[in-house]
């Protein structure tokens, strides 16, 4: 009887720990704990370059692209985000910014929706 009680206590403890761990899990998407829309706000220096392929790309823009671009799926989600769309960003132009910034280790050929990173 005592061993059955110990077993039940152990099972109860495991269930309790599992529930606590599940409640503490933070949702993480393409950009970790930050949403693509929040990350898109950091890309303000790229606004003109993401709308006009002939516009110069600022060093501030390239810095942000390098930081976010460490995670290609995040960079893609940012370019396709609601914030980017509502700002007039053209994904087919925005996707060229890493190349225009001369980022050597960009993920060439990475698929971003209907677009491919050059």
Image: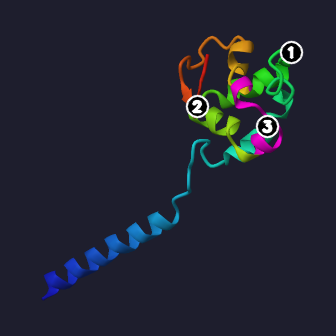
Q: Which residues, given as a range, are shown in magenta? A: 83-93
- Quarter occupied by residue 11: bottom left
Q: Residues within 10 Å of mark 1 (few under 14, many from 20)?
A: some
* Whole-number angstrom distance, CA of label 2 to CA of label 1: 24 Å
Depth-wise, is mark 1 or mark 3 nearer the camera? 1
Distance (Cα) linking label 1 and label 3: 18 Å
| Residues at circles 1 and 3 in contact by the CB criterion of under 8 Å | no
State the residue position of label 1. Answer: 56
Q: Which numbered marker is on residue 42? A: 3
Q: Main secondary structure of the magenta part?
A: helix
- Residue 113 in percent (x, y) is at 57, 34
**x then y, percent, for residue 58:** 85, 19
Q: Position of residue 90 (x, y in %)?
A: 75, 31
What residue is drawn where x is 40% and y is 69%? 17
Vertical side of 22 occupied by 66: above or below:
above
Q: Residue at x 39, y 67 (%)?
A: 18
Q: Is residue 85 magenta?
A: yes
Local crowd at mark 3 within 10 Å, few (<14), some, or many (≥20)?
some
Q: Are marks 2 and 1 in contact (CB under 8 Å)?
A: no
Q: At 63% across and 39% down in the image, what residue appears?
A: 77
- Residue drawn 12% across and 89% down? 1
Q: Earlier in the sequence, mark 3 or mark 2?
A: 3
What residue did someone put label 2 on? 114
Rendered-image quadrant of the C terminus: top right
Q: Which of pointers 3 and 2 indicates the residue nearer the eye?
A: 2
């Amino acid at each position: 009887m005592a061993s059955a009680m110990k077993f039940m206590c152990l099972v109860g403890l495991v269930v309790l720990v599992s529930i606590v761990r599940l409640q503490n899990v933070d949702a993480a998407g393409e950009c970790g704990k930050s949403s693509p829309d929040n990350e898109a706000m950091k890309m303000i220096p790229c606004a003109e370059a993401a709308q006009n392929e002939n516009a110069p790309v600022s060093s501030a823009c390239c810095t942000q692209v390098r930081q976010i671009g460490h995670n290609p799926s995040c960079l893609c989600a940012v370019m396709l985000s609601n914030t980017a769309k509502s700002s007039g960003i053209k994904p087919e132009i925005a996707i060229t910014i890493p190349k225009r910034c001369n980022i050597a280790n960009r993920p060439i050929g990475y698929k971003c929706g209907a677009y491919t990173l050059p």
